[in-house]
Structures are given as C-alpha cells and as structure tokens.
Amino acid sequence: MNAENILRVADAIEQHAIKDLGFNMAGYCDRTTPDAPDHTGHHCGTTACIAGWAIAIEHQLTGESLLEEITRRPVVSDAAASFLGIDGHQASDLFFAGSHPEHSDNWPAISAEAAVRTLRHLAATGEVDWTA
C-alpha cells in the first residue's frame, strides 16, 4: 500500500486540486450530465471517480501525458490500483464501493466527502471501509 499516494488523491479531491475536474463515481472521466453530476459542487464540466483522480494525480507527478499513461496501462482500474499500491480486492471495493452499506448498488451517488474519508481510512489502516 502506498499511503502517500492515497493521501495525495484524498487531498486532491478534497481541495479540488485539479480545477477542471470534479468528482463522481459514475465513470473514470466523463462530461457532467444530470445523471452524473459533479458532487464537489464546482460544476467544471468533467468528473472523475477515485480511479480517475488517481491517474490524474499520477500524471501530474510523472509529467507523462494522460494519453501516454492510458496507452502504457490501458486498464484504468489496474493503473490506479498500482499507483495507490493496493491489491485487486481493495481496488474493487474502493473503486466500486462493494462494501458501502448504502451505495453498493448506487455507487455513482457517493459524495466526494465519503470518498475522501474512505481514502484517509485506507491510508491509515490498509482497509477499505466506507463506514469509517
């Protein structure tokens, strides 16, 4: 587990560190729509899920273009899991909210605040716990 990178992603979502990117678990990187609104309230036109934010932060750190990153590692969830240093089970639970008590069937409704709390808990404990 790479707690430093996990906290980088939590901080970036919380601080809206990428000004053109909002938050919604509905997709890796999507235009906002009524069905997939920006849960940060910034309404910048594009949203990303936790995996999308992880890739965007990695892109900023490495200086690689996002296209190069996607070409090098075409499965976004695998690339994001690698950046965060988490295994497949943790990645599935984090990116698709499998253990979330209210949103396991409706993970696009998860707020940015809930994602940040879950990321901080993961960095501290090594466990994905959407109720933390």
Image: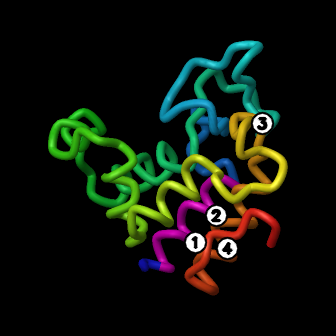
**Relative to 112, is 10 above or below?**
below
Name which residue lies at 62% across and 69% down.
128
Q: Earlier in the sequence, mark 1 or mark 4?
A: 1
Q: In the rendered structure, which amino acid carries the disc numbered 4?
A: Arg
Q: Badge 4, how many Cα within 10 Å: few under 14, some, many 20+? A: many
Question: Residue 2: x, y in percent?
Answer: 43, 78
Q: CA distance from mark 1 to mark 4?
A: 6 Å
Question: Residue 37: x, y in percent?
Answer: 74, 24
User: Position of 130 compared to 28: left or right?
Assistant: right
Span highlighted in magenta in the image: 3-14
- Quadrant of the drawing holding the C terminus: bottom right
Q: Badge 3, how many Cα within 10 Å: few under 14, some, many 20+? A: some
**Relative to 86, is 93 above or below?**
above
Question: Residue 77: x, y in percent?
Answer: 39, 48
Q: Which numbered disc, 2 or 3, marks the residue closer to the eye?
A: 3
Marks 4 and 1: in contact by CB < 8 Å?
Answer: yes
Marks 2 and 4: in contact by CB < 8 Å?
Answer: no
Please tell me whether mark 4 sits on a helix, a strand or a loop.
helix
User: Which residue in the protein does label 4 denote?
Assistant: 120
User: Which residue in the protein does label 3 denote?
Assistant: 109
Q: In the rendered structure, which amino acid carries the disc numbered 1?
A: Leu
Q: CA distance from mark 2 to mark 3?
A: 20 Å
Q: CA distance from mark 4 to mark 2?
A: 9 Å
User: Position of 121 compared to 93: left or right?
Assistant: right
User: Which residue in the protein does label 2 denote?
Assistant: 11
